[in-house]
Amino acid sequence: MDAGDHERRHRRAGWARNAPLRSAAAGPGARADQGPAGRRRATPPRRAADGAARPPRSCLLDREGQPEGGAQPPWLGQDAELGPGIRPATAQRVTVQGGSVLVTGGSRGIGKAIALRFAEAGAQRVAIGYLRNDRAAEETAEELRALGAEPVLVRGNISGERVLREVTELGPLDAVVHNAATGVIRPALEVEDKHWDWTLGANARALLSLARAAAPTMPPGSSIVGISSLGSTRVLENYILVGTSKAALESLVRYLAVELAPRGIRVNAVSAGVVETEALRHFPNREDMLRAGRERTPAGRLVEPRDVADAVQFLCSPQADMVRGHILIVDGGFSLLA
């Protein structure tokens, strides 16, 4: 990397940390006009040199310094219209085609595959949450554009208050997928309290926070999906922090499935088997895990990110209307063997 590249990246990173909430521009330097009552008029599509319409640029949502006393998303259960108790939700056949979705951890690996799968299914806007890898996020955004979707980049810790406020500003979402995950791979007696707090917050508590931020505006027939792993029910070497946090996520899925049912929102999870992604680089026994996965999977191969994405797409489709609070295992049969 030369000095010019470093300076450009530094400027871009600084801009991203302090960028305001922006909508996709119609062209270089263009802004949407203000209409009556402060509403924004639709901007004409961007045009290439040959006059053909070009897909919109991605929006980058990453803000700091919110004003004190700003509006906060309502807590679950505070909807006066719905009230307490469970009542049958009105039948709705919501699909992601033409809709808006959010995928946390959506710039790489399984999350990227899920985001692209939504775009293939016709989602109009795909928001991807990511922590700090701007290059990976921008590359995924380009692939989403190529599939006809408008990418929206949400940069930062998904369990942070600032990012959650930005989630509320995305507007009604037809699907929310919590794929972002982290953790420390150590034996139980070597972990520290800060490791526990960080892992549980990112893997489990963030799902509840996302539901609180997004559910109030999600339409009946929409879906929330968490991504879990077999370590939630099986003891894996040095996996105690991640495994227990995924068990907490699965429990949250069941509770949310019941509490959000009156709103017509489905909540489920996908528990994936061994998937060869960049995340496995942090495992000291990575090669052993991959070898065992290949040898012991009845399907004859490892699970691929696309397999998980297809399962998520199904859970977010009308065909899964009566699937509620379910943990869908996608492991090629690996967990069937003792």
Image (cartoon, rainbow, N blue to C red):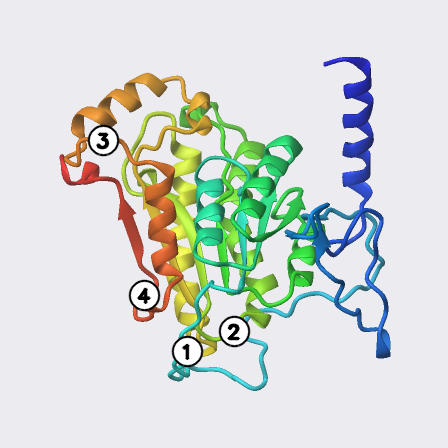
- Disc 3 packing (10 Å; few <14; some 14–19; many ≥20): some
User: Do the numbered discs 2 and 4 sit on residues whose CB atoms are within 8 Å?
Assistant: no
Q: Give the residue displayed 66% in from the left and 34% down from the top.
A: 134
Indicate which disc, 1 or 2, sits on the residue closer to the N terminus.
1
Residue 107 rendering spot, x and y as whole percentages:
55, 39
Badge 2, how many Cα within 10 Å: few under 14, some, many 20+?
some
In the depicted structure, whether residue 86 falls above or below residue 286? below
Q: Which residue is mark 3?
A: 301
Q: Amino acid at mark 3?
A: Arg
Please tell me in which quadrant of the rendered image residue 43 appears. Answer: bottom right
Marks 1 and 2, Cα distance to the nearest angstrom? Answer: 9 Å
Are circles 1 and 2 on residues that touch, CB within 8 Å?
Answer: yes
Gap in Å between the C-alphas at discs 1 and 3? 37 Å
User: In the picture provided, is 32 more to the left or to the right than 145?
Assistant: right
User: What is the three-letter code of the residue carrying label 4?
Assistant: Ala
Q: Is 97 rendered above or below residue 29?
A: below
Residue at the extreme top of the image, as rendered: 2
Amino acid type assigned to the residue bearing label 1 in the image: Gln
Question: Disc 2 marks which amino acid?
Answer: Pro
Q: Work out which residue is located at the far bottom of the displayed protein and give it.
A: 81
Query: Picture quarter containing residue 33?
Result: bottom right
Secondary structure of the residue carrying tag 1 is loop
- Disc sitting over residue 320 in the figure: 4
Residue 92 is tagged as 1
Say whether marks 2 and 3 touch (CB < 8 Å): no
Percent coordinates x, y for residue 133 in the rendering? 63, 32
> To which residue does mark 2 refer?
219
> Which residue occupies the foreground of this view, 132 or 306?
306
Asked if residue 258 lies left or right of residue 143, the reply is left
Q: Residue at x 74, y 56 (%)?
A: 23
Gap between marks 4 and 1 measured at Cα? 12 Å
Residue for point 59% across, 68% down: 172
